[in-house]
Image (cartoon, coloured by chain):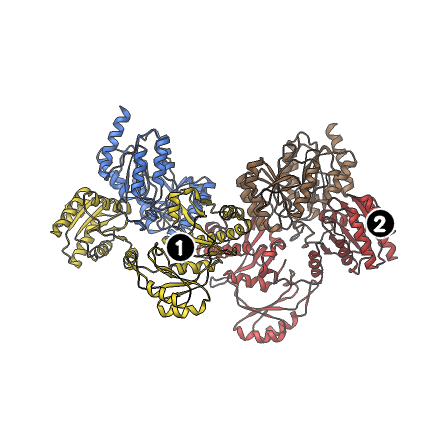
Chain colours: A yellow, B red, C blue, D brown
Amino acid sequence: MKIHEFHSRNIFRKYGLPVPNDVLCHSVEEVEKAMAKFDDMVVVKAQVLVGGRGKAGGVKLAKNKEEAVSAARKILGMDIKGLTVEKVLVTEAVDIEKEFYVGLINDRNTKTVTLMASAEGGVEIEEVAKETPELIHKLPIDPLIGLLDFQAREVAMKLFGNVKLARKAAVIMQKLYQLFVETDSTIAEINPLVLTPDHKIWAIDGKMNFDDNALYRQAEIEAMREADEDELKEIDAHEKGLSYVKLDGNIGCMVNGAGLAMATMDMIKLYGGEPANFLDIGGSSNPQKVVDAMNILISDKNVNAVMINIFGGITRCDDVARGLIKALDIIKSDIPIVVRLSGTNAEEGLALLKETGLPTVETMSEAAKKAIELSQGQKS
Amino acid sequence: MKIHEFHSRNIFRKYGLPVPNDVLCHSVEEVEKAMAKFDDMVVVKAQVLVGGRGKAGGVKLAKNKEEAVSAARKILGMDIKGLTVEKVLVTEAVDIEKEFYVGLINDRNTKTVTLMASAEGGVEIEEVAKETPELIHKLPIDPLIGLLDFQAREVAMKLFGNVKLARKAAVIMQKLYQLFVETDSTIAEINPLVLTPDHKIWAIDGKMNFDDNALYRQAEIEAMREADEDELKEIDAHEKGLSYVKLDGNIGCMVNGAGLAMATMDMIKLYGGEPANFLDIGGSSNPQKVVDAMNILISDKNVNAVMINIFGGITRCDDVARGLIKALDIIKSDIPIVVRLSGTNAEEGLALLKETGLPTVETMSEAAKKAIELSQGQKS
Amino acid sequence: MSILVNKDTKLLVQGITGRDGQFHAGRMKEYGTNIVAGTSPGKGGQEVNGIPVFDTVSDAVKKTGANTSIIFVPAAFAADAILEASYAGIDLVIAISEGVPIQDMIRVNSIIKQNGTKLIGPNCPGLITPDEALVGILPGMIFKKGNIGLMSRSGTLTYEVVNMLTMNGLGQSTVVGIGGDPVAGLYYQEILEMYENDPETEAVVLIGEIGGDAEEQAAEYIAQHMTKPVVSFIAGQTAPPGKRMGHAGAIISSGAGTAEEKIKAFAKANVPVAKEPSEIPGLLKEKLAKATS
Amino acid sequence: MSILVNKDTKLLVQGITGRDGQFHAGRMKEYGTNIVAGTSPGKGGQEVNGIPVFDTVSDAVKKTGANTSIIFVPAAFAADAILEASYAGIDLVIAISEGVPIQDMIRVNSIIKQNGTKLIGPNCPGLITPDEALVGILPGMIFKKGNIGLMSRSGTLTYEVVNMLTMNGLGQSTVVGIGGDPVAGLYYQEILEMYENDPETEAVVLIGEIGGDAEEQAAEYIAQHMTKPVVSFIAGQTAPPGKRMGHAGAIISSGAGTAEEKIKAFAKANVPVAKEPSEIPGLLKEKLAKATS
């Protein structure tokens, strides 16, 4: 789960990280009013859940109220990578002597939270990682011990080369680690961490993502969720026990199991088609899930053919067939469907489907080919 | 450092432990007023920093306002083991089906915080430990891992024999561990932990001690300190870099080093005398410390002879002699003194003392004998 | 032989009185797995499918000698269940539970390493040594005893591939579902090493998917250490970046973890990558023919 | 031979630029201890008493091969300093710092155990192998090379006893001040074992004090494992319960940890307990005479 920059900044503040003052504004009027609180230069920043807003013109420096209002006017309503800017953050501008990067991620290989720090801040860390990986200092943190003082200080010394600044930065890293663990983050980064000419350190921009599996114990974080239309559909599917991700193609897929669902998408692509989604109905045999899944599929206007690919293990193919019959009965759609049932109770399932007249095939390759054929027939 | 029961209860509450409502009262009038908040039976409990108040009559059950006021009248001003009761806690009484003990201590052998739990609650755990140690369940807690759910549950099952209650009690144990570590406790015990007939669990009485060495990072705890006269002297000495404990004898001791100071006291006793104190001037050579130490010694009216026992290692004997000369100059006391200087710069120190006419001896045995002689000469 | 589970496995089912635990305990027992005990705090003394239930894992181990445990408790309690098994001396824990927080698994992996416990999962279908022990939720009837080792981050995709193997006469030594979570227990490298050392395994199928770089690491390991042939398949070539594809671990973050990179790594390590699952039996037969020629 | 420190000790002084660190580095060097480096973050590149200063322990170890470290940093930073030494691969750490919180030491002991680091202290005077290495704040001139091992929870009481030994012609193999804190590093039992295995040590003096039951445990260990004679002294027979006698560890709590109990335990283990320190040389000579007769 992602959250807005202003939410990240508030979490940072709660944990004692140095974040400049800011005001969140939803309109030009609010920006005008907010400027009463700032004496000096401010930055007006688009709040969107996507990277690259700087390049898109979503971040502007303003010397006074007039400039801030004019910046807000330009940014509010702007489109950044398909998202409309509905909020801006007005924040104190700080003088920048140097920019650093400090971030934490869960590392799959070391099975630890890993600290990443670099004197190359302010740019996308992925770029640095690709071009000059030696400029990123990595430290896997022992989960039972935490980030020790001397460890944080040693990393900070590599960035700042000055023990007084390193001590300050070390404390920031330790607080970032604490909030990372306590909020079940998957990413927590400060980019840039800024050193000012008068030797103050500020967390200027923050990015945090969270572990969806841990939201049950992070009510405060979950309340910060702000989903777009596609994500709402995904969340809705999740609540129904389904895993759904919308894509841009036209062949709807309904599959049991995440790996098989991905393989199904891949196969459609392999034979020249375009999958409209990832949809995993999971391991249960509840026919209602099939009805819910079918509803989600046909609510996507791009879908003009559906491929159902089930390998019955715990899922019983006859249950899927029953769900499908029920769904067709309720939904009344004329989008063509191809069904592949294999594994547990496949024969029973296929027998049930015979009455519906739905085309059935034996293998997933055949199913993919048939689905593409159906979708093209539909087009022409 | 010890704190009052009402302070322990407040810390317990802060960590979410189930503690019955209570009101702290300093007078009978306050008790009368407080009773407006209670509908049912209450307990009036003396707040003193010493055990055994129950046996001394410092805890009384009261059915109504009149009884509570009468109990408070008896308890306030009462003397318990030499301490005057100045506060009482009025607290909701709860029905008791069974009493348990749950406590945490720092265990020197395992070098861990150790959980102790027993179905024999409400009595002094030291008694249980002596008589029936098999009734105390002990669990050393891995400091890097903490008290795991299943571990707490297993211990709680041994006490409650019922999984629902055990789950509740396990959470209490885990919270107690969290507060123990976070407050740098040396003891945190709930005694009794009470099970009511309607299957609620309450922490009825709490005791907490704290690590003096950690008070620098426990401002909130240190603010709860309430020292008696002797303790104030000890704290004052501590601030001057001295370690002082008042005893009941008449021979004042000034020694460098805790072990040597204890051995000095022991030796006085061995030769038939009574030490008036433990006083360690530490390892520094600052003459001012000797002045401060001498002031503390003679402020004890029981002291009628002083034994100074210095083994110079880092401490230089000539510095001690200088301090002593300065002290005698300022203090003008006629309490007789015997001095033993040995080790680093002993000869220089002894030469300096020659002018003062103070009796000096070579060994600590001789010093002890001489001090006893001086103290008896004084008496007669 | 085989790896991890076999006729000597004495299985404990943690959470045996729950819906899933009860159901799968029955299925595993039916398959012939030697289930010696179940646990459910407060329900010690009961029986489920004729299996004795204990309050604690420690009790169960003492009374039955259980050496392997399978976990069916809800995600929020899975970490504690794994630790309970580990502290009770269980050698191998299989965690089926889905949705366990990553931080829990980071802590758990660190602790059980100290105790010397092996973990598979969480969020995995378990593993099977055909005709000896089924420890998990896999459909036993599609497996056939043989010489192919297979490991996979996915469940049904595994069944799909196993079914093809079996239909093509390629039986399996042990099939391991390592699970779809980003931080899990035993992973490709450890299991590849076991297959390499298992006399019964002649070739290995590695089914990977997008997210992380475990496949790249496995490729490197294979190039350096494996003498037995390995073939692979990678799911998620069409997955968009930044989206979690069902499995918590199946996500392309910051452009890393793509199928393309993984396929490239396997190519470099001389591991053929099937374009679709149905190619796997053919690739295996080719490799096996070469190996014996 | 000797135990723990000797001619091969390459000492690092952590906190060498502080008042105490600087002073004692000078004294130890004067005694002949091989001090190879000091640390003080931000002061790398400087020199103190001719000793090179580094920013980090890790740097110092890499550049100088330091294998032992002594810590003079303030109590609040002592735990971190010990851990820094441990992670840098130092074998033996001596923490002089007084006033370290107990919880810090509980954590530290658990972590350094994983790393295989030995710790003496905190709140200790250090240790000395006469004529080879002085690592601590002990007054070197009272020690004399010989065959008595001595360990103690106290500083000046140790000097008092050592002085008597030396004056009575009883030199010392290694004298260890284990420190006065309740939770410390190496304790009686570990050090007794080292003395037992040290060919140069012929007899051992154990100086204990009130608080805890380490002396009782030592007595039991001696009875079961020690072939060399041990004599002891216990300070604090007149100490009242509940009061901390200078040392954080010297406190009789809930009636346990009294001198009486400790003396009883030693009597049971056939370890003579001196009534006053001056009896120790005599008791030793008696025991040694018996041992050689």
Residue position for label 1: A207
D185, D92: nearer the viewer: D92
Q: Chain of mark 1?
A: A
- The span from disc 1 to disc 2 (Cα, nearest Å) is 72 Å
- Where residue D108 is drawn, which disc sits there? none
* In the image: residue B83, left or right of residue A179: right
Do dots 1 and 2 share one subunit? Answer: no
SS at badge 1: strand
Residue A73, compared with residue C215, is above or below; it is below
From the image, which quarter does the N terminus of chain C lie in? top left
**Which image quarter: residue B297?**
bottom right
Q: Is residue D118 visible?
A: yes
Instruction: Give the x, y percent position of residue A315.
Output: 25, 48
Q: Position of residue B153 (x, y in %)?
A: 47, 52
Residue B204 visible within the image:
no
Residue C64, how many percent across, how many down? 42, 41
Q: Nearer the viewer, residue C234 or A217?
A: C234
Q: Residue most toward the top?
A: C293
What residue appears at the point 67 percent right and 62 percent down from the top-left corner? B227
